[in-house]
Amino acid sequence: MLYLVRHGETILRKGICIGQTDIPLAKKGFNQIAEQTIPQLLTLNPLKPVLLSSPLIRTMQTGKILSNALNIPIIPEDALKEINMGKWDGLAFSYIQDHWPDEYQQRGNSFAHFRTPQGESFFDVQQRVLELILPLCHTPEPIICVTHAGVIRTLLCAANQRPLQDLFTFKPATGSITILSKKTFTNKGLYLV
């Protein structure tokens, strides 16, 4: 099985474009992981899992809580990072809309393939994550990936054979666990556009 854990709630305020900007968990985020995510994960009983995490602060803080609770090491993995939002990262969406109106509209029309200035597209994210995940689907151990909403959404699109344009129909909450069968990613006909 593949367990995709979204990091806990962060100190970020609403309306800000965040990709790979490093922000820590809020106190509520630490509590959320300890009080909700850990008990849920323990009921799922993943025997001898491998724990991978995006190296960003919010995911590593989440991963360390899981690592301590499960008594397993955490392995940082760059492929699990959130989408690179380039020049837009850390800016208010209202500012982006004012300063890049055409690009902002293009992104809304094509979430799958639009790259922000000096950033990447969700297709790029999906490809880098699948390069990591596909070989792991042939291993016997359960895999826990501590990651971000964008990464989880791209994997859910692939697993459900949905186009990336539909990625915002998936809404993984902070601290949530999304469970996917490894068989989903070893079957032929995976939809990757």
Image (cartoon, helix red, strand yellow):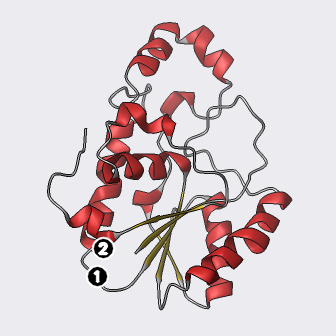
Q: Residue furthest left?
A: 188
Near mark 2 (Cα within 10 A), the count class, few <14, some 14-19 or many ≥20, is some
Work out whether 49 lies above or below 52: below
CA–CA distance between discs 2 and 1? 5 Å
Looking at the rendered structure, the secondary structure element under dot 2 is helix
Q: Name the residue type under label 2.
A: Leu
Q: Are marks 2 and 1 in contact (CB under 8 Å)?
A: yes
Q: Name the residue type under label 1.
A: Thr
Picture quadrant where residue 98 is located? top right
* Residue at the spot 50% in from the left edge and 16% down from the top edge: 104
Picture quadrant where residue 58 is located? bottom right
Query: Residue 93: where, in percent of width, then height?
Result: 64, 22
Q: Which residue is mark 1?
A: 139
* Residue at the spot 28% in from the left edge and 82% down from the top edge: 139
Query: Residue 65: where, in percent of width, then height?
Result: 69, 76
- The N terminus lies in quadrant: bottom left
Image side of residue 165 versus residue 170, left or right:
left
Picture quadrant where residue 107 is located? top left
Q: Nearer the viewer, residue 76 or 139?
A: 139
Work out whether 82 lies above or below 54: above
Q: Nearer the viewer, residue 30 or 60?
A: 30
Query: Residue 141: where, in percent of width, then height?
Result: 37, 85
Query: Residue 28: where, in percent of width, then height?
Result: 83, 58
Image side of residue 131 versus residue 114, left or right:
left
Q: Which residue is mark 2?
A: 136
